[in-house]
Amino acid sequence: MNVTNILKAATVALLGVAAVAALAGASNAADAYNTAFLGVHFQNDNEMYEPTSDAERKRIEKVGQIFTSKLTESTKYRFADVGPELKARIAAGQAPGECGGCEVDYGKELGAEWVAWINVQKVSNLILNMNVYITDVHNNKMVFVRSVDIRNNSDEGWERAINYLLKNYLLPGVS
C-alpha cells in the first residue's frame, strides 16, 4: 500500500468514526430530559441589614450558567428556551416551589418534561444554603431535591456548592 492509499483509508475510517459519534450524540440528545430552568432565586433573610450586593447578583447568574452548561454537556438534559416575557413573569411572582404549582404550569407552557430551579438562602453573610429542585411536569412530582450549606459568601463558596451538587448527586461519575 502506498502513502496515498493509507491516507485515503485513514480518512474513510475517521469519517466512519465521526458519523457513529454524531449518531450517538443525536441519540443522546433525543433521550435527554427536556427541562425548563426557571432560574436561581435568592432569599436574603437579612435584606434589611445586609442588602443583596452586586457580587451576589453576579454569583446568582454564574450558578445558573454552571448548572445549565454542565447538565447540557452531560447530554442527559436539554433546556427549553425560557424567553424574556416568561422570565419577567417568574421574577414578578412568587418563587418556584412557593407558588402553589406555578413551576409546573410554566413547564407545561414551555412543553417541558421537567422544570428545575435553584434557591439560595442567605441566612447571614457566613451561612448560606443552596437548594436544587427538579419536578416532573406530567406527574407534578419532585424527582430531585438536594441541598448544601455554604460557609462563606464568596464566588468560590457558591461555585463549590453548585459543583458539589452536580458532581455528587445529579451527575455522579461524570467528570
Image (spheres, helix red, strand yellow):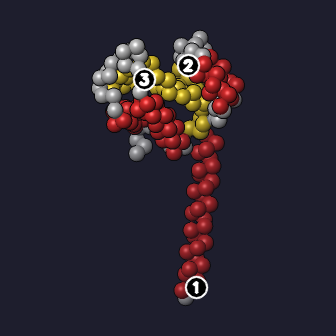
Q: Residue at x 66, y 32 (%)?
A: 83
Residue 89 on image: x %, y %: 64, 22
- Mark linked to residue 141: none
The kind of residue tagged 1 is: Thr
- Badge 2 marks a residue whose secondary structure is loop
Residue 144 on image: x %, y %: 49, 25
The image quadrant of residue 63 is top left
The kind of residue tagged 3 is: Thr
Residue 57 on image: x %, y %: 46, 30
- The answer to whether the residue labelled 3 contacts the one labelled 2, judged by CB atoms less than 8 Å apart, is no
**Figure check: 146 above or below 175:** above
- Badge 1 marks a residue whose secondary structure is helix
Say whether disc 3 or disc 2 marks the residue closer to the N-terminus.
3
Q: Residue at x 54, y 86 (%)?
A: 3
How far apart are labels 2 and 1 at the CA level?
Answer: 62 Å
The kind of residue tagged 2 is: Pro
**Figure check: 174 above or below 24:** above
- Mark linked to residue 4: 1
Q: Which residue is mark 2?
A: 96
